[in-house]
Amino acid sequence: AQSVTQLDSQVPVFEEAPVELRCNYSSSVSVYLFWYVQYPNQGLQLLLKYLSGSTLVESINGFEAEFNKSQTSFHLRKPSVHISDTAEYFCAVSPSGTSYGKLTFGQGTILTVHP
Amino acid sequence: EPEVTQTPSHQVTQMGQEVILRCVPISNHLYFYWYRQILGQKVEFLVSFYNNEISEKSEIFDDQFSVERPDGSNFTLKIRSTKLEDSAMYFCASSEEVQETQYFGPGTRLLVL
């Protein structure tokens, strides 16, 4: 079984400040890792994912996350946030291998960017 | 860009009634999923569906629940005899392959009174 912990339920920051949203996971098997974002009144959208290879993955809108196997973490970072980044962010894992893609989510972090 | 759609966006029902939540996955996708999020809690996996049968289901997905792909486009979640604790946001998702990105719909907010 897998579990995901997002350590911060809410993160308020000012525009152009850096931000880190923390995610730790627990699993007895190898996993794939994901960050999803949910804007108000919309569905979950994939922000970035780690399947294999380079442990640092990037999104098209400036977010990045680094897979740290020893610390079982997959923290999400952005060096300079915008008002439009205000949303709820979900970390998720999926067992690699023969699993049918079941995602296990963290409880979410609400990022609020203030002007 | 193709997207997953869900209907209705909101549904209110009386306890004990049956509800059917509908989803239209992205057309070339083969894997389908239902998740739910009770207010204030995590998004939880309910069931995955492939090749017209359930491939995996969670403990939540008991005999009260069923899924069906009645035609080539729709994917439905039926909840028989709804309970108060079934009140949640229900998300449908689909993916092209099993380990590919899951694309989520906007959700159906179900309120059981």
Image: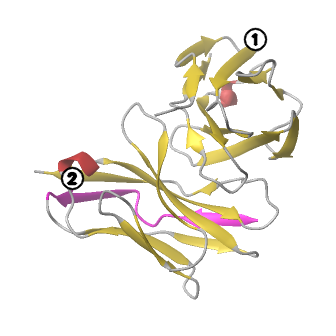
Identify the residue at image location x=69%, y=57%.
B99
Callout 1, which amino acid? Gln
Identify the residue at image location x=79%, y=18%.
B71
Q: Which residues are magenta?
A: A1-15
Q: Is residue B107 left or right of residue B94?
A: left
Outermost residue, left side? A115
Identify the residue at image location x=14%, y=62%.
A16
Q: How is the image coloured?
A: secondary structure
Secondary structure of the residue carrying tag 1 is loop
Whether residue A21 is visible: no
Secondary structure of the residue carrying tag 2 is strand
Q: Are labels 2 and 1 assigned to the same chain?
A: no
Q: Identify the mark at residue B17; answer none if there is no mark.
A: 1
Picture layout, residue B12 above or below residue A85: above
Image x and y of residue A65, in percent: 42, 71
Image x and y of residue B1, in percent: 46, 34
Q: Identify the mark at residue A113; answer none if there is no mark.
A: 2
Q: Chain of mark 2?
A: A
- Which quarter of the figure has residue B111? top right
